[in-house]
Image (cartoon, grey):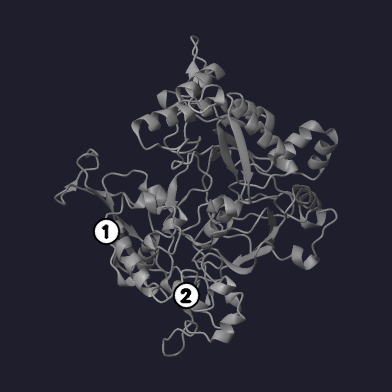
Amino acid sequence: MKIKVGYGAAYGRLFKLSAAVFALAALTSCKEIPNSVHTEKELASNTLYTPFSGRSPKHLDPTSSYSSDETPYTYSIYEPLYQYHFLERPYRLIPRSAAEVVKPVYLDKDGKVLPETASAEEIALSVYEIPIKKGILFAPHPAFAKNEKGEYVNHALAPEVIDQLHNPMDLPQKGTRELTAEDFVYSIKRMANPRIIAPVYGTMVNYLPGLKDFAVQVRAEDKRLRADLKPSDRDLPFLDLRKFELKGVSAPDKHTLRLEVKGKYPQFPNWLAMTFFAPVPWEAEAFYAQKGMAKNNLSLNYWPVGTGPYMLVESIENRKHVMERNPNFRKTELYPCTGEPGDEAKGFLKDCGKPLPFIDRIEITAEKESVPLRTKFLQGYYDSPQIERLDNGQGFLIGMADSAEKEKEYKEKKLQFPQTIEAQNTYFGFNWMDPVVGEGKTPEERERNKKLRQAISIAMDWEEYIQIFEKGLASPAHGPLPPGLFGYREDGAAAFNPIVYEKTEDGLVRRKSIEEAKKLLAEAGYPGGRDAKTGEPLVLNLDFQAAASPSTKAVLDWYQKQFAKIGIQLDIRGTDYNRFQDK
């Protein structure tokens, strides 16, 4: 596992984009862009141009979304309760749709209030009463449109209208309403919706007391609604979660959300900064549940509905996505006035107190190949080569180090490469259900499989990987927490992985030897990489998140080399990223 050092790259007109998601700083004026491919009108439109690689995002539904390529959309369109201060490090939670970041009230098993200093063993419930900001409006959307009688005008569209509808924003009548605490209650209920892939459910069911029983009720209701449908039918009747109570999640009043959490769970507020806890209006689900909508990919996965600074107005799958400023977004969200030491000198605070966002339109276009992408970026077609990644500047830095000509070109174009430690890690995951590398069903299997995983972990020489492929711009990780996150330790036992590393007599940390890995492999029942009982070679499969190509060949060859060092054959199964997520 490794922790990356991130470098951003930006080139183009003066822009700064901020919705507590990302911000890029300005390099040149529009008149300085050589070989501009944009018209004067486009250049004057306050539009951010950036590409995306591969395929379109798979999940824009906030309850399902859990991948970095989706975040430029989801965190710009949706507003969770909390967010992280944009400039301060270590990361600090601040309000987003909530009015403040609250401390929990601790209760014992009898419901009596405990002091903040109470031990975890004493605490039965942690109760959060979170005030919601008043006056927040959803972005204009047809799901909210009503007539003079207060009836929803787009919840029973004619079949011929739906058949021709590919962009919900093409419907002439749109509406909005104020955000309420009930919208958060509804969104939390969606974690248990059997029709939705909610990666957070497996964790939250252990902490939200009523979620498991609620899921049973909702599954029964879904089964009833599907009784006369085929398993392959995509059009499903509206599953109205408002009809069922979720114990421990409530709205005591219009602008207060009450959450009861089992025991003491200090990390829970950090979950509230993720889109899983972003408000979802029931009207949107009812609107998209109309017969015929699924055929045209009209759903929250493709057309999100939120209160954030942007709204999706155009979406052509695998080609182009456009977000525009939400006209209902409040003017009270301001650019921060504090940051890390040195931020003021760098100019990061010069927009202190200005209303957000600064960009009117974000146009994200598909680019399948890296070479055309880089060429277009250097020509000024794009303002950023890939806005959701902080490490896209590494390739430019490597190019500058290898070529004096490129170094001269990039400096003339005033490319900027601000450096930071990125809160990200890269890791290999083992399929826990796999009989060979997974958990195992018996104590003997568990011990054998564990030793196999440990042998592989030692053999994977991330120090070598970092030097070859990252040019030294990363750090080997000793745990899941990267620098900058609460809980990260630079020294002590928490910063040392004794399974993979050992300390020398002079206190240095080094990776254990290949001989140690081979010993563990033999103890796991695979001496020399062969099954001790059958003599068959051990072959493991690696599902890779991109199709095999010339650009990935060197990395994939390196992976196979690492496994071969201890005699294991690695079969790499490449796929596109959306399919990889399914797997």
Label 1, residues with CA under 10 Å away: few <14, some 14-19, many ≥20:
some
Q: Determine the secondary structure under disc 1.
A: loop
Which of the 4 quarters of the picture holds residue 539?
top right
Question: Mark 1 sits on what residue?
Answer: 248
Q: Determine the secondary structure under disc 2.
A: loop
User: Considering depth in this image, is 184 or 349 the residue closer to the camera?
Assistant: 184
Question: Mark 2 sits on what residue?
Answer: 289
Instruction: Specify whether residue 241 is in view.
Output: no
Could you tell me residue 130's position as x and y percent? 33, 58
Name the residue rendered at 39%, 32% in the picture.
Answer: 446
Could you tell me residue 291's position as x and y percent? 50, 79
Q: Is residue 13 above or below residue 535?
A: below
Label 2, residues with CA under 10 Å away: few <14, some 14-19, many ≥20:
many
User: Considering depth in this image, is 172 or 243 the residue closer to the camera?
Assistant: 243
Task: Say which amino acid is labelled 1.
Answer: Gly
Could you tell me residue 540's position as x and y percent? 56, 36
Quadrant containing the N terminus is top right
Q: Is residue 153 above or below residue 516?
A: below
